[in-house]
Image (spheres, rainbow, N blue to C red):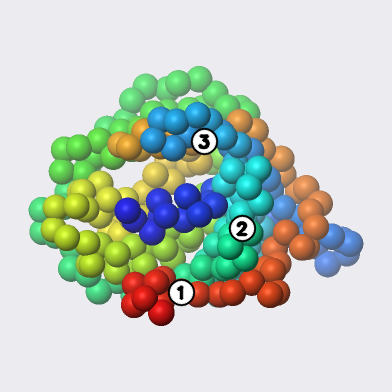
Amino acid sequence: MSVRRGLLHLGAAGLVMALASCGRSSPHATILYMKERELGGPPFPTRIIVNRRYLRIDPDTGTGNYILFDRKRRIIYSVDHSDRTILVIRSHLITLAKPAKLRDTVKSGPARGRFKGHKLRSYRLYTNGRQCYYVVAAKGLLPGAVSALKAYSDTLAGEQALTAANTPVGLETACDLADNVFDPGREYAYGFPVRLLDYEENEKILMAYKKDVPVKSSLFALPAHYVRYSPGEVRNGD
């Protein structure tokens, strides 16, 4: 299983945009309200909060777990309340060699209505002939959220590369390698996805969003007494 999928199971997924101006008493952000399914299962609500410094993802909002991405320091923190732990993932260079035969293609479809005044268009993203993503997106929709999510994917890709390097040959698919390591965040290349479906039937649907919302600064804080650990410690059995 990729680190990206693992984070989603730990408690991941949410988004937003904008920063508090100096005269405001509380930070402001853009909040996205999503509906998700994993492996074609039952839907659950996800919240995403974004400003210029942070991206916070509340996967299944009923669990209390969340992911906090420090955009300036390029560090991902995955907070698990039941274990009272924080998984810390730092950005690092990818040294894994890209397979020579990894080839990405895109097929665009007709317009599919509008969302909040933005025209929607569909895209099918392939790697080595297999459809990895079906995307319905709107150019110009929520560019701040797109930028934050793309940076999150880029930061996570280094750890995904280490996972791929330690995975037996044949278990990582072409879609896994393209989506998670060598072309991370490619699903955001066409604007914010109003609907996103991957090859494993994981689905995300944007239900609504609000801009310039006052939020508590505690949403961007980490529990002080939780145990912190890295993916390297897990791999090494520490």
**In the image, which disc is placed on residue 230?**
1
Q: Is residue 177 above or below residue 116?
A: below
Q: Earlier in the sequence, mark 1 or mark 2?
A: 2
Local packing at callout 2 (Cα closer than 10 Å; few below 14, some 14-19, many 20+) is few
Numbered disc 3: secondary structure = strand
Q: CA distance from mark 2 to mark 3?
A: 22 Å
Q: Tag 1: Cα neighbours inside 10 Å, few (<14), some, or many (≥20)?
A: some
Residue 95: image location, x then y, percent: 25, 74
Quadrant for the C terminus, please.
bottom left
Kind of residue at badge 3:
Glu
**Closer to the eye: label 1 or 2:** 2
Q: Which residue is mark 3?
A: 36
Disc 1 to disc 2, C-alpha distance: 18 Å
Q: Amino acid at mark 2?
A: Ser
Viewer-side residue, 201 vs 80: 80
Question: Dots 2 and 3: beta carbons under 8 Å?
Answer: no
Q: Give the x, y percent position of residue 191.
A: 48, 41
**Dot 1 and dot 2 residues touching (CB under 8 Å):** no
Visible in this render: residue 201? yes
| Marks 1 and 3, the one that precedes in the sequence | 3
Under mark 1, the amino acid is Ser
Q: Secondary structure at mark 2?
A: loop
- Provide the secondary structure element on which disc 1 rests: loop
Name which residue lies at 80% across and 57% down. Answer: 216
Residue drawn 64% across the image and 44% down it:
61
Q: Residue furthest left?
A: 101
Q: Which mark is residue 82?
A: 2
Quarter of the rendering containing residue 183:
bottom left
Residue in front for this viewpoint, 91 or 166: 166
Quadrant of residue 164 within the rendered picture: bottom left
